Image (cartoon, rainbow, N blue to C red):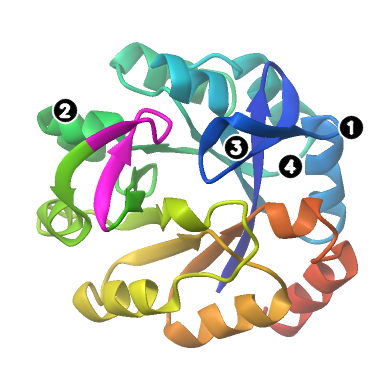
Amino acid sequence: MQLVPSISIHDGRTARLIKGDFENEKVFDLSPLDVARQFEDAGINAIHLVDLNGAENGTIFNYPTLELISGHTGLKINYTGGIQTDGDLLKAFEFGADSITASTVSVYKPELFKAWMISYGREKIMLGADCLNQQIRVGGWLKKTQLDLFEHVAYYYDRGLKYIKTTDISMEGRLEGPPFDLFKRLVANFPNLCIYARGGVRNMDDIKQLQDTGIFGVIFGSSFYEGRITLNEISDFIKNNP
């Protein structure tokens, strides 16, 4: 199982949101590059880079930070936030993304999202399927939809989707534990899908329990920034799970 730390960026700074609320934001002293280097030194080889400005405004914004991390680390970067057009996608790859996660375009422009999977390959395009009460939310979690999580995932799964990132938004940043049952159901329904679970991770015990559900990877953030998961613990997990 892969460990993938998340670095959220707002106006070039390291930040995080509680329950996806832009009015409830915490900014950290360490720059995104400093955080990325710490993860790399601990043995991490990939990060999930979240452009909060991009998600809020519908076009990528923090690509200078993407370029900075790409140019000064060897990390593979999955970039997300505001990728809604071919131009956004090309800019993300041009400035150093190894892969991208898109959600809004998958809801409103499904033909475009499917074209990206065909043109760039399944390894490069991940579906972001974040939900609240099992209904998909997009646009930085600000926009409601009537789409059921499982129906939405099934549509793209039947069309060759390989990777998905999903979270229960109500658990984001709260450090109250992941929605284990939700992830178990996803694994059972989509056995050939590589599922990255995110949201609610409190400590390494949660990560080990998620590993037991059969998911492909865990994306975590708040538990590290709040000191509940240490760099040593990350390093030990990687060594013990080659």
Q: Which mark is residue 108?
A: 2
Work out how far the residue at label 2 is from the one at label 3, CA to CA, in angstroms: 23 Å
Occupied quadrant, residue 237: bottom right
Mark 3 vs mark 1: in front: 1
Q: Position of residue 206 (x, y in %)?
A: 62, 78
Tag 3 and tag 1, C-beta contact below 8 Å = no
At label 1, the amino acid type is Asp
Q: Is residue 137 magenta?
A: yes
Can you tell which quarter of the image residue 16 is in?
A: top right
Q: Nearer the viewer, mark 2 or mark 3?
A: 2
For discs 4 and 3, the disc positioned in front in the rendered view? 3
Mark 1: few, some, or many residues within 10 Å (few <14, many ≥20)? few
Instruction: Tell me the kind of residue under disc 2.
Output: Tyr
**Residue assigned mark 1:** 29
The residue wearing badge 4 is: 74
Looking at the image, is 67 positioned above or below residue 235?
Answer: above
Query: What's the magenta region?
Result: 134-144
Identified at 35% across, 72% down, the residue is 182
- 228 shown above or below 187: above
Residue 49's label in the rendered image is 3
